[in-house]
Image (cartoon, grey):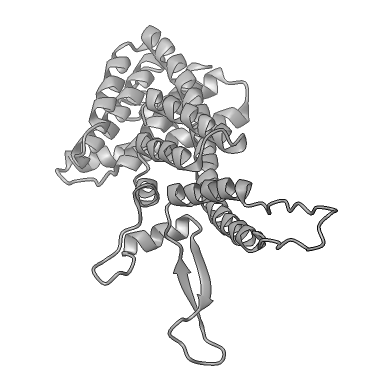
Amino acid sequence: MPKDRNEEALQLSEEILKNFELSEIPTQHILLKCLRLARISNDFEALEWLNQEANGFDFDAKGFMTQTAWAASAKSGRRYFTDDPKSKAAKPKKVEMAFTQSIAVMEAAVDGAKARMAVAYDRDVSISSHSTYLPTVPPGNQRERRDLLELIRSNTEKIEKVKSKLYQYVFNLNYELKFGEITEDIFTRKRKSVDTNLKDICPEAIQKFISVYENLKSNNDEDWANAVHTCRRIIKEVADSLYPSSDIPVGVPGRNPIKIGEDQYINRLIQYINSKSTSDKFSSIVGSHLKFIGERLDGVHEAANKGTHAEVTLDEAERYIIYTYLVIGDILAL
C-alpha cells in the first residue's frame, strides 16, 4: 500500500475506534466508515463481508442466503442455533441460522421502542374523598412496556454482536497498519543510509536500484528475474569498488588460498569485512548472509547464461532486494 494510503487508513482506523469506544455516532454510520477503511486498505475479503452488512444480505430465488451472504453472517457474529422448525421429534435437533436485519433497521427499532416507552406509562387515577363509588381503573400499560423492553433487549443484543466483530476487525487492522508503518520507517531509514553511502563509492548503483524498482512493478516473472540480476550487479560493483579483483589468491592460515578474481565478488567482500571488522561474530554473520544471497544470485545468473529460465517469484525478488540493501548497509557501515 502506498505510504499516503497507509497513513489515511491508519488515521481512519483510529477515528473509527474512537467512534466505537465513545459511542459518538450510530453503528450504521460507523459501518460505512469500516467499508471505506477496507476499500483504501485493499482488503477485498473484508469488502465482500462489509458490503453484505451495509447493503443487505443476498438471497437466492428459493429464499435461501447465498454462499457469500452466509459466510458474511458468520464474520458478523449473526449465526445462532435453534430447534429445527421442521422437526416433529420431542427433542428436535439444532439447526444453525442467522438473523439478517440490517444494523440500520435494528437501531431504528430500538430508537422507536425507546420513544414509545417514554409515553407508555400508566395514567393517574383521581379518587374523590366525598365519593361513595370507586372509580373504574383503566387498564395499565404494563404489557406494552414489557413487550417494548423485550424488543429493545433483543435488538440491542444483536447490534452488540455485530459491533463487536466490526470493532475487532478495525482493532486488528489498526495494529497491522501501525506495525507496517514501523517496519517501513525502519527500512526507509536503512535505504536512505545505504543510498547516501553508495553515492560516494558507487554512484552507478543508485540508478540500478531504480531499475530494480521498475522491474518489481511488472507482472512479468522475467522482469522479477531481471531485478535479481541487477542485485547481483550492484553487489559486484560494490565489491569492485571496495576490494578490486586480483589474479593472486589470498592466503589464509590453516586453509587453502582464497580466489579473489573477477567472478569471486563474494569472496572479495568477505575479505573486505574481515579486514575492517573488529568483531569475529559480525564478520561471521554478515559473511554467511553474503554467501547465501550470492549463491542464489549466481544461480539465477548462470541459468540465464545457459539460456534456461530460473523461476523467480515476486515475493522472492522482493526478499533478495531487501537482503541486498541490508548486506550492503552492513558492509558500508564498517
Q: Residue furthest left?
A: 307
Residue 265 at x, y percent in the picture: 36, 27
Say above or below: 115 vs 274. below
Number of residue marks: 0
- Residue at 66%, 63% in the rendered image: 139
In the drawing, does residue 62 fall left or right of residue 144?
Answer: left
| In front of the other: 2 or 160 | 160
Q: Is residue 261 toward the left or the right of residue 96 in the image?
A: left
| Rendered residue at 47%/72% (across/down) | 96
Q: Nearer the viewer, residue 212 or 246?
A: 212
Name the residue located 32 percent from the left edge and 28 percent from the top edge. 231
Residue 294 position in % (x across, y down): 37, 35
Q: Quadrant of the N terminus?
A: top left
Quadrant in the rendering for residue 200: top left
> Does 6 appear above or below 98?
above
Q: Is residue 225 left or right of residue 148?
A: left
**In the depicted view, which residue is nearer to us: 263 or 186?**
186
Q: Of residues 149 and 5, which is closer to you in this image?
A: 149
Residue at the spot 48% in from the left edge and 21% down from the top edge: 190
279 horizontally vs 166: left or right: right
Residue 148 visible: yes
